[in-house]
Amino acid sequence: MLSKTCATVAFRFSSQRTAFVAASSSFGKFGSGGGLCRFASAAAAPMDNNNNATTTVSPESLLEHFQTTTKSSNNSMIGNNVGDAMYALYKADAVCFDVDSTVIAEEGIDVLADYLGKGEQVAALTKQAMEGGMKFQDALQQRLELLQPSQQSILQLLQEQPLQLTPNIDTLMNALQSKQVDIWLVSGGFRIMIEPVASLLNISKHNIVANTILFDEVGNYNGFDKTEPTSADMGKPKALQQIQTQHNYRCMVMVGDGATDAQAKPPAQAFIGFGGVIERQAVKEKADWFVTDFMDMVHIIEQR
Ligand SMILES: [Mg+2]
């Protein structure tokens, strides 16, 4: 696979609009094992042909531009490394999204449990698993054994009640696709439920890493694939590592609402916490940038 490179881009501020001018050198080297990429620092402003000052894009310049042009409130500026996260997003060659309560405005397993009339029982098991520190794979197994979902019941659910997309996620996906940024859906949920969501957003089903429910020859529940990286604890960093190894990405960003999403950095260079569906304090504290509206991310992508 060819490695993807990020070109340094300079932009100048003009009176009516901001023009972006590609320059030739590359950004500094990226971190090899994890953590944030090393960023090019803002150089002394060079001049373009019209003697307008141009500024190399940096975390600081993106942050300043974002604040100026969006007139953002402090609510858009929550995070431990907001400028660095914006910069990682600005030059990312892959952005990985959690699905439940991030790409969709609900939790797939809860929707399935409600549909099968076992919502309360699954919620009790989930709570018990979280409080008891149960391993992810054991919790997944317990809930699926309780649900015993058949292939037919899941397909029927998806037809009757398609999963609801989070506001503005389609705009964000379009923006990434228009800039040739690869998109991945990395979820502890179920592939069979995520594939229609991916299709709605024009994401290849090959760019889904999620759990696979197994069915017997007549479509009855028959366990799940325990070799999927997302079926066990620390599944998200493992999944991103596999994706990075396969595609030789230089700069990946992880987006999600949960603490397990924050674990994906490293190998992700930045973790963007999403609180538009559920706002979790622990995620807010771990996030490089915490957003509640995907349009904030669109704004950065559009600067590329
Ligand atoms: Mg989630």
Image (cartoon, rainbow, N blue to C red):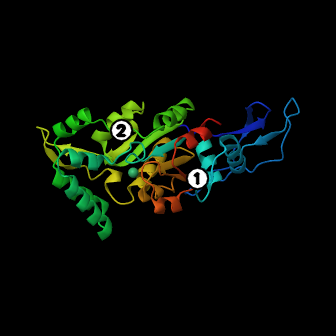
User: Along the polypeptide, which appears first: circle 1 or circle 2?
Assistant: 1
Q: Which marked residue is nearer to the observer: mark 1 or mark 2?
A: 1
**Residue at the spot 49% in from the left edge and 47% down from the top edge:** 244
Labels in figure, total? 2
Q: Which quadrant, please, contains the C terminus?
A: top right
For disc 1, the neighbor class at 10 Å (few under 14, some 14 to 19, many from 20) is few
Task: Name which residue type carries label 2.
Answer: Gln
Callouts 1 and 2 close, C-beta under 8 Å: no
Q: Position of residue 74 (x, y in %)?
A: 62, 53
Instruction: From the top left corner, tell me how far across and down residue 261 is, in percent.
Output: 44, 54
Amino acid type of disc 1?
Asn
Where does label 1 land, which residue?
75
Q: Nearer the viewer, residue 190 or 275?
A: 275
Q: Is mark 2 within 8 Å of ligand 1?
A: no
Residue 2: which quarter of the image?
top right
Picture quadrant of residue 14: top right
Left or right position of 173 against 200? right
What residue is disc 2 on? 164
At a point 44% along the width and 41% down the height, the residue shown is 184
Question: Is 266 or 303 nearer to us in this picture?
Answer: 303
Q: Nearer the viewer, residue 12 or 34?
A: 12
Q: Residue at x 55, y 40 (%)?
A: 295
Q: Residue furthest right?
A: 51
Viewed as shown, does residue 110 lie left or right of 14?
A: left
As measured in the structure, the alpha-carbon distance from the residue carrying label 1 to the one carrying label 2 is 25 Å
Give how far across and how far down residue 136 sits, in percent: 31, 60
Judged from the image, the secondary structure of the residue bearing numbered disc 1 is helix
Residue furthest to the bottom in view is 132
SS at mark 2?
A: loop
